[in-house]
Image: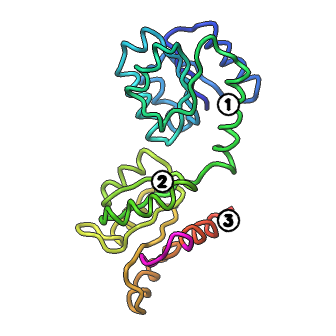
């Protein structure tokens, strides 16, 4: 679903929705209503936002649209005058902006940008989402840096954060620290498996212990795999690449 947000049913916005549907995309024109967007939240693949004086004045809507895109790891295409660009980018970080189109809009250029994004980020070409759960923030950020070019990556420092993340986002794999305070890896795995929404998400344990007894206790929980924390970047990427190839 491509979400087109415009404060009014302008000719340009309605024409864009019609053009997208002609191109075979599902598209919805919204005035930015939170209630309306919530109904299609999980199906949003791209947001196209028409800036306007009304939109500039409604920071709440801009913040909400920004949060939706960030939660889903989706991009936003911004359309507006140069004078509106600063207001948009003061709320929406550039990392979420796929492209800025100034008025007067050249529709063919916009469609080309949409086509490329959808081709690269949906279906079989969609980047997989990996959630890292580890109370060691330094190690977690290191793994994040290793994976961010190849995967959409989420981070959680404990089981509660992991459950909260997965309530709002879909993940294709969880990298779960085996030893954490309060709720350890096995306990978090049990919580995930007890929920119908998260029970089928593959989990790989991250462990700092490679001795026989430790490995047997990890394997006994039937994770998708286990990884020693001494693993290097090339080996981790190769391991995940092999895992997702088998998933296909």
Q: Which comes before the other along the chain, label 2 or label 1?
A: 1
Q: Secondary structure at mark 2?
A: strand
Can residue 230 be found in the magenta stretch? yes
Looking at the image, which is closer to me, 168 or 197? 168
Q: Residue at x 43, y 86 (%)?
A: 215
Residue at the spot of label 1 = 113
Pointer 3: residues within 10 angstroms few (<14), some, or many (20+)? few
- Compute the Cα span from label 3 to label 2: 18 Å
Q: Secondary structure at mark 3?
A: helix
Q: Which callout, 3 or 2, points to the residue nearer the camera?
A: 2
Q: Quadrant of the N terminus?
A: top right
Residue 225, image x, y percentages: 52, 75
**Residue 245, disc:** 3
- Compute the Cα span from label 2 to label 1: 24 Å
In the image, which residues are magenta?
227-235
Q: Which comes before the other along the chain, label 3 or label 2?
A: 2
- Compute the Cα span from label 3 to label 1: 28 Å
Pointer 2: residues within 10 angstroms few (<14), some, or many (20+)? many
Where, by quadrant of the figure, is residue 20 drawn? top right
| Left or right: 241 as drawn, with respect to 229 | right
Q: Quadrant of the C terminus?
A: bottom right
Question: Residues at badges 2 and 1 in contact (C-beta under 8 Å)?
Answer: no
Q: Residue at x 61, y 68 (%)?
A: 243
Q: Which comes before the other along the chain, label 3 or label 1?
A: 1
| Left or right: 107 as drawn, with respect to 191 | right
Where, by quadrant of the figure, is residue 187 drawn? bottom left
Where, by quadrant of the figure, is residue 55 drawn? top left
Q: Residue at x 44, y 41 (%)?
A: 71
Looking at the image, which is closer to me, 230 or 15? 230
Residue at the spot of label 2 = 153
| Left or right: 204 as drawn, with respect to 57 | right
């Amino acid at each position: 679903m491509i979400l087109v947000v415009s404060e009014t049913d302008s000719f340009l916005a309605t024409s864009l929705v019609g053009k997208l549907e002609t191109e075979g995309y599902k598209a919805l024109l919204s005035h930015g209503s939170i209630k309306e967007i919530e109904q299609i939240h999980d199906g949003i693949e791209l947001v196209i936002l028409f800036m306007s004086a009304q939109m500039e004045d409604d920071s709440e809507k801009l913040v909400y649209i920004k949060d939706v895109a960030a939660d889903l790891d989706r991009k936003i295409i911004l359309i507006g005058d140069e004078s509106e660009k600063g207001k948009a980018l003061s709320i929406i970080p550039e990392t979420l902006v796929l492209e800025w189109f100034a008025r007067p809009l050249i529709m063919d250029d916009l469609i080309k940008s949409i086509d490329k994004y959808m081709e690269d980020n949906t279906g079989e070409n969609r980047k997989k989402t990996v959630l890292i759960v580890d109370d060691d923030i330094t190690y977690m950020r290191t793994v994040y840096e290793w994976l961010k070019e190849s995967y959409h990556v989420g981070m959680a420092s404990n089981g509660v954060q992991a459950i909260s993340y997965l309530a709002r986002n879909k993940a294709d794999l969880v990298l779960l620290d085996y030893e954490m305070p309060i709720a350890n890896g096995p306990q978090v795995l049990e919580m995930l498996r007890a929920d119908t929404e998260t029970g089928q998400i593959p989990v790989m344990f991250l462990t700092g212990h490679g001795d026989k007894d430790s490995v047997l206790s990890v394997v006994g929980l039937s994770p998708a795999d286990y990884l020693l924390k001494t693993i290097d970047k090339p080996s981790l990427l190769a391991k995940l690449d092999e895992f997702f190839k088998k998933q296909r």
